[in-house]
Amino acid sequence: MRRNRSLLFASLLCAFLVISIAGQSGRKQKKAEAQPPVQGVNRPELRTQPEPEVEAESEEKKDEKKEKGPAVLVMSDMGDMNIPMYYTDTARQACVAELHETMRMLDVREGRNQTRSDAVKAAKEDDVNVVYLELVISNMGTMGGVDLRYMIYEHKTAKVLGAGSGYPMQPNRGAGMPPIGANRIQMQLDWAGRDVAQQVIKRLGLRP
């Protein structure tokens, strides 16, 4: 009798274990909810957007900023009636071209023939260093009896930063051929305008 009870108890226990195991296997496991990243912990796998990369400013870019500075405006005088107008144009255009070629990052502008008061006004109001060119008749002039003179007006103050004359010296690196139909005087004026440009670069401290 006792043996039969033991067998019955064992059978009931096994049946209970089988039912419990089947119930647990059929129950769905809950997924673990994603926890927000802990502050101060670098976890790149949880980022939704990549962090922007900050590019270090190169030394070349810094030098470019230094070279720029205030713009340079090259203007020329109305000129004497005995001096052909295209003489003045030749000298002014050569000065602008030399500034462009030598200081590529510099903002160089060209103004038409105007008066000295216009140059002073431009320096004060337009915030530019103004280079004012003037052709004058001179018995000692080597370019068909004329001299090329210049004045530099400082931006904002219009203070005179320098003055002098341009000399018809051929640049060491060589200059381009004169336009078709240009005469020797025009070629000399071209060189003189380029000489003025080099003097301006030095006086303004533009060359590192």
Image: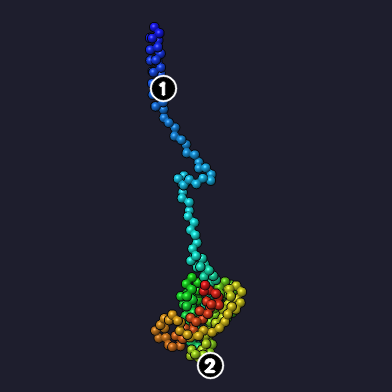
What type is the residue that disc 2 sits on? Asn
Q: Is residue 1 above or below residue 38?
A: above
Residues at marks 1 and 2 touching, judged by CB atoms closer than 8 Å: no
**Residue 169 placement (x, y as % from top left):** 47, 85
Q: Residue at x 40, y 12 (%)?
A: 6
The residue indicated by pointer 2 is 139
Q: Residue at x 39, y 15 (%)?
A: 10
Q: Is residue 174 visible?
A: yes
Q: Residue furthest front?
A: 3
Coloring scheme used: rainbow
**Residue 160 placement (x, y as % from top left):** 60, 78
Q: Is residue 89 above or below residue 38?
A: below
Going from the N terminus, do you reach mark 1 or mark 2 first? 1
Q: Is residue 6 left or right of residue 160?
A: left
**Quarter where residue 165 is shown:** bottom right
Q: Residue furthest bottom?
A: 139
Q: CA distance from mark 1 to mark 2?
A: 123 Å
The residue indicated by pointer 1 is 20
